[in-house]
Image (spheres, rainbow, N blue to C red):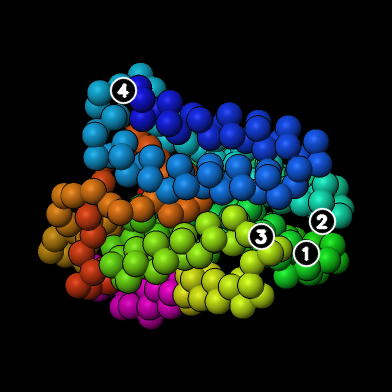
Amino acid sequence: MAVHLLTASGALLAFWAVVLIVQGEGEQALRVLALAAVIDAFDGTVARRLEIHRRLPQIDGGLLDNLVDYLTWTFVPLFWAWTFLGIPFWVCAAALVASVFGFSHTDAKTSDNFFRGFPSYWNVLVLYTYLFELGPTVGSVIILICAVMVLIPFKFLYPSRTPHWYNTTMVLSAVYMVIVLIMMYNLTAAPAWLPVASLFYPVYYVILSFALVYKKHRAPRGANAGGDAPQTGPTHTGPLSQDAHRPGNEADETERAPDESAIAWDSANSRSD
């Protein structure tokens, strides 16, 4: 239950952030959202390691996590953008509705450990829009593009559960988290080069996602036919170092550590856990 309470604490942080926004404490609200993201980065891993789904089967940890994630990764960041960045209400509304459908899609997390569509990283977009002073027009265009991408069935990397380039992704995720925490502590007082340097991870994330999807489509149709079923997840047990992410750590699932030796693709597109 303590693990579920840790996940649920994100809802309290979301409420705290809203209070700070209403009080005009924009930067403090961003720091509270950063704390929520840190909790979200590892609570799912802890839950899977302790097999919480078996110990407390009456509580749906994945649903709990998604509810909290929608608040901390979508609703509050977009409310922040409307309040402090001047993003029009209708733009924020479009992103909110798109993410509602994104979160509730039966294949939001695919059977081969990807996110379906843009995984609603609105807090990350809002942070960069603020630090780079992009303004409401450019910010609105970026948000609308990503809102459309939430609904497009394109696969994006699920960092903490991918069987592809797992070790590299986890190391880069840890480095990125440290840089983001430094930026969140300093915000506009941070050195100008730091936000630019931090873009290494979003670029890596997008390029790897596109590369893996391209490789899947290039693979022969019968590559996985016959023989043993392809591996779509971890191949040996052990805790993961980080649940980077975004919506939905699925805190009630069992997870094994991945094998980076090969890229194998599922020919099925069944409903995710």
Residue type beneath disc 2: Leu
Spatial distance from mark 3 to mark 4, Cα to Cα? 41 Å
Spot the residue most to the bottom. Answer: 218
Residue type beneath disc 1: Gly
Pick whichever of labels 4 and 1 is earlier in the sequence: 4
Q: Nearer the viewer, mark 4 or mark 2?
A: 2
For mark 4, give the secondary structure.
loop
> Is disc 4 surrounded by few (<14), some (14 to 19) or many (20+) residues within 10 Å?
few
Pick whichever of labels 4 and 2 is earlier in the sequence: 4
Pick whichever of labels 1 and 3 is earlier in the sequence: 1
Where residue 5 sits, quadrant-wise, is top left
Image coords of residue 153 (percent x, y): 54, 60
For mark 2, give the secondary structure.
helix
Tell me, yes or no, whether the highlighted magenta stretch contains residue 187.
no
Placement of the N terminus among the 4 image quadrants: top left
> Do the residues under discs 2 and 3 have CB atoms within 8 angstroms?
no
Closer-to-camera residue (189/84): 189
Q: Which residue bears the numbered disc 1?
A: 139
Q: Nearer the viewer, mark 2 or mark 1?
A: 2
Where residue 236 sits, quadrant-wise, is bottom left
Q: Which residue bears the numbered disc 3?
A: 187
Q: Nearer the viewer, mark 3 or mark 4?
A: 3
Spatial distance from mark 2 to mark 3, Cα to Cα? 15 Å
> Do the residues under discs 2 and 1 have CB atoms within 8 angstroms?
yes
Residue type beneath disc 3: Leu
Q: Which residue bears the numbered disc 4?
A: 57
